[in-house]
Each structure stands twice: as C-alpha cells, then as structure tokens.
Image (spheres, rainbow, N blue to C red):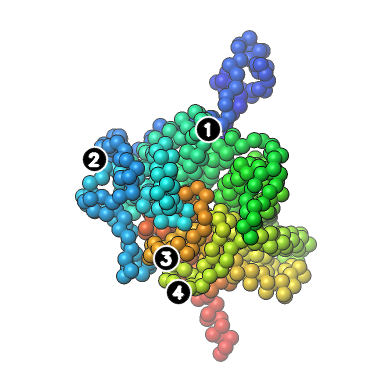
Amino acid sequence: MVYCGKASQGCQNCRTRRIKCDKKRPGCSQCIRVGKKCPGYRDQLSLMFRDESSKVIQKAHAQWGSSGSPIDASGPAIASASSASTWMTESPGGSLDSPQSSSSPSPRDLEPAKLPKRVNLNLEDQGLQFYINRYLMNHPDSPRTGDQVAAYCAAAETTRNVMIAVGLAGLANLQGDKSLNLIARSQYGTALKHTGQLIADNHPSSFVARVRSVVSLALFEVVQGNGPKSTVSSANTHINGAVAVLRSVIPASPVRSTAVVGASSNGQARVGLTSDIQARGGLGIMMLLFTMLIPYQMTDTPLPPAFFDTLKLCGLLMGSIPESCACGHVYASARLLELSAKVEHTVLTDGHRATEDIIQQFLALEDTFEALEEPHHKAFPYTVHHGDCPPEAVFRGTWHVYGMIWGARIWSHYRWARILVNQEIAKFITNYPISSSKAISTSRRTKCYATIDRMAQDIFFSTPSHWHHPMLDPQDTLKFESNGTGNSGAVGLPSLLWHLMVAGCAPNVPLEYWSWAHNVLQVVWKQMGMQHALELSEIMEEHRAKLDKKAAKQSPKLKVEDE
C-alpha cells in the first residue's frame, strides 16, 4: 500500500463513468441528475496508501523474468520470525556482520560484505539480522540501553516486514543476487500491505509504528536503487506519506498552552505558549520537509502548494521557540529551488538587465541564508573538537558534537543549501562575466568561494555525528554522538550522502574534498549495500572526469603561453 499521492475525491459512480464529480453533499449533482444514489466519498488518508502490492510483485517478476513465486525462485522457504533477542546475535554457523579489527584494511580496499555459503538462518532472519546490524545498530541515532533496544524490538514487530525487505535488498546488492533481490521486492510488497493496514486501523498506540514503517519504505527505495532520479522520486512518495500520517494526528491549529518545550544552552527550562507535543510534531514534520527538498532539486520539479501549506502549519505549531528559525531556512531553500529552476529554463544574455536581476536575486537569497546562521547557532548549538582519528573516518581530525541528532541534520541541510546558492553565484561569475562584474564586487566574489569551502568542510566535520565509519572502534564513536530522538539508525543517512556529494563536487574546492566524500560513499555501498551510495559515487566520478578533461585541454594552452 504505497503512498500514491492525492487520490481522487470523487464518488465511485463518477469515477466509474470517468466524469468530473462536484463532490456536493449529501450527494453529487451527477448522481442526482441520472437518478442514482450517490455512494459518498472516500477517506483520503487511507487512499494515499491504497493497495499496490500485487503490482509491485508483478513488476518484480517482469523485471527479473521469473514466472514462479518469489519463494520458489530462492529455494528455501521463508520461515517464521525469530525472537527479538535473536535479531541481536550472530549466526552460530558464521557471522553475517563481523566487526572491523584494528588492523582492518584501508576503506578504499574494503570489499563488499559476503555471506558464508552455509548459514543457520532462514532468509527472513538473514534480512532481519542484516538490517539490525547494518542499518539500525552502530549508528549515531541507534538504541543504546537495554530498555531502548527492548522498546524498539517491541515496536518494530509491526514493521518487521519493512526491515526484512531493506535487509534483503542490501544483501542482494552486495552479492549481485537477482533471485534474492526478487524476494526482497516481494517482501516489500508484503510490507506495503501491512503498512496500509496500520494506516487504516489508525490506532493511537500504533502511531510510531505507522511513521516508522512509511519512512522505512522510503529507505527501501534508496537501498534498492533504480537510478538517482527515480530512486529519490520513489522515496519522496513515502516521505509525503509520512507527512500525511503526522498531519493526521497533530491538531490543524496550535492550542495555546504554557508548557516546557526544551532547555536553553545553560540547561534552564524554556517555557512558551506552544505545547511540547505540538512543537515536537511541527519539528518532526519539518524534518521530513527538509528531506523532500532533495528530490525536487534533483528532478527539477516545482514544489507543490501542499508543501507550503504544511510548512505554514509547522510555523504555527512551533510558535516562537528558537527552533522555529528552521522554518525560514526551509522557505529560503524552497526559494533557491524556484530560482535555480528559473535559470535552468530561461535563456539569459550576458550584459542584459534581466541577467543582472537574476544575479541580484541570488545575492539577496545568500544574504537571507547568512542572516539565518546566527539563529541556527542559538537554536542548534554545537562544539568543535580536534583529535587523532583515522583520516578516512574523521576529516582532518576535526568533528562537531551537537546537542541533538536532528540539530546535526538541520545544519547539514543548511550547509547544503548555502553551497548550492553560492554555486549558482559562482556559475554567473564564470558564464556571465559582464553582468556579474556589475552586480558582484571583488570582495563578494572572494566571500562566495570562501563560503562554499567553509560549508563543505563543515559538512565533512559533522559526518561522524550522522554516520560511523566501520574502521572506528565502537567505544571511540561515543565522543562523536548527540542525543537521539527516535532510535532510527540509518534513516537519516541518504540525505547526508547527497550533501557529501554536493560538497565534494562544489566549485573550486580541493581534490581532497572530492576524494574524502567519494570514499565515504564507497564505504557505505560496500558495507551496507545501499545502491543510492553507489549511484552518487558514480555521479562524482563523472564530475571528476569532466574536470580532468577540461584541465587537460587547458594545459597545452598554458604551455604555449609560457613558451
């Protein structure tokens, strides 16, 4: 029951006849006109997750050329689930996830993880264990204490099929096993169906499970992979669904009530007129909106009106708490996407007033982002640390420590957006020298490239707060971690990978930046089987090849000039 966007609101009679329904109550005009009883209108939230399971499975059969059932194609049958305690243990017959030793090879030489030929786990358990070991545990936002692990396992029972699907997809990618990939897609179809049932039940106690299931379905799309644009577009449909689930349980307008909504930097309680639940709900929805920006930027499609309606609701729910500055950040990012799309689809001429106007708009947008930096420091504080760490795992031996994991994620989105806006300004400097010379001063040009460099470095410095390199000792990773919010494991990783790619390919940054970001993407691919990481690393390689080719063409010219 995949999220399929906004469903038709017409009655069944009008939809069957394929005519427009005016949706009047108690009955539509079309039914009254032909003398039929109007059957009424459907519940929109459940329709967003209408059953597409059979279509998913049929598509999988067609793609891999299998006419039998997914289970038949794999050989062994899928047995019943093991207990929660089994999830956290390795197979007696061989380890699915051996920890890295201190003498482990360089990450560049890491080979994709392989399963032993014989294991004592059925396919469901293999997928589940791979998910637990690679996608849930050993991440900054992972269950830590025994109580947290027990609580997660209890809640995760309802989302177990999604976890199995993600785990099997990662294993299939690492092994190049099309049959296992088919089973993963079949399990994904089952997960869609069960998620739809959770949505339809709409029981308050299953709220966390509903959100976790929908977001994990998006993670499956990222792990499975189907080309960068298709992957992020498919994942985005599930993120839309998660937003719909959150909006279904959060009041449409905030209730004015005095409540503690957080703590200030000195540890004192902060009291405001926005309730704690509403403020957290608004922040949770906004985090999903941040994630949605990436697909729209990559596919170059305009943000829908519903995006801005939801963002407005976030602002109302969060009120005047310091964290509400992130709403302005989202608005600025949306404006950036709008301006970038305009440039992409407009023929500009160097020296013309229209070109100068566009440049001025980007400069004004950069000023907006710069003004948001200080409020972000107050709302989402972090400290900078230095130490002796493996250079592949910690960029230049420097890392950030954030108060909360969602603070680290908001900062990462902020830096990504500032790189993009300054990257657009840098393009104008290169491609429209006449217009840019009039609009951009020499000091502003220097500041543009310095900002790109600073934002890229900060993305790298914050990486250990989002993801732990496998060559790091688990005890050493504690110094990088922030307080978690949802024990969600690797759910936030796909966005970070996109930010790393943008930072590594930013204009005028050193080759060191490209190499470090590319290396992280390769390690994620080889350790987690996340196809999205491989696809982004290939985009980086294409970008590097173009730069090298351009440099090779310019080299003979420089040599002739020297002679």
Seen in the picture, residue 446 relative to 133 is either above or below; the reply is below
The CA span between labels 1 and 3 is: 39 Å
Task: Determine the secondary structure under disc 3.
Answer: helix
Q: Which of marks 1 and 2 is nearer the N terminus?
A: 2
Q: Name the residue under label 3.
A: 476
Q: Name the residue under label 1.
A: 204
Q: Which of marks 3 and 2 is nearer the N terminus?
A: 2
Seen in the picture, residue 509 relative to 486 is either above or below; the reply is below
Disc assigned to residue 75: 2
In the image, what residue occupies the spot 71% across and 39% down? 256
Residue 25: percent from left, percent from top: 67, 18
Q: Do the residues labelled 1 and 3 touch (CB within 8 Å)?
A: no
Q: Which of marks 4 and 1 is nearer the N terminus?
A: 1
Specify the farthest residue to the right: 353
Task: Determine the secondary structure under disc 4.
Answer: loop
Q: In which quarter of the image is residue 538?
A: bottom left
Q: Mark 4 points at which residue?
A: 388
Q: Residues within 10 Å of mark 3 (few under 14, many from 20)?
A: few
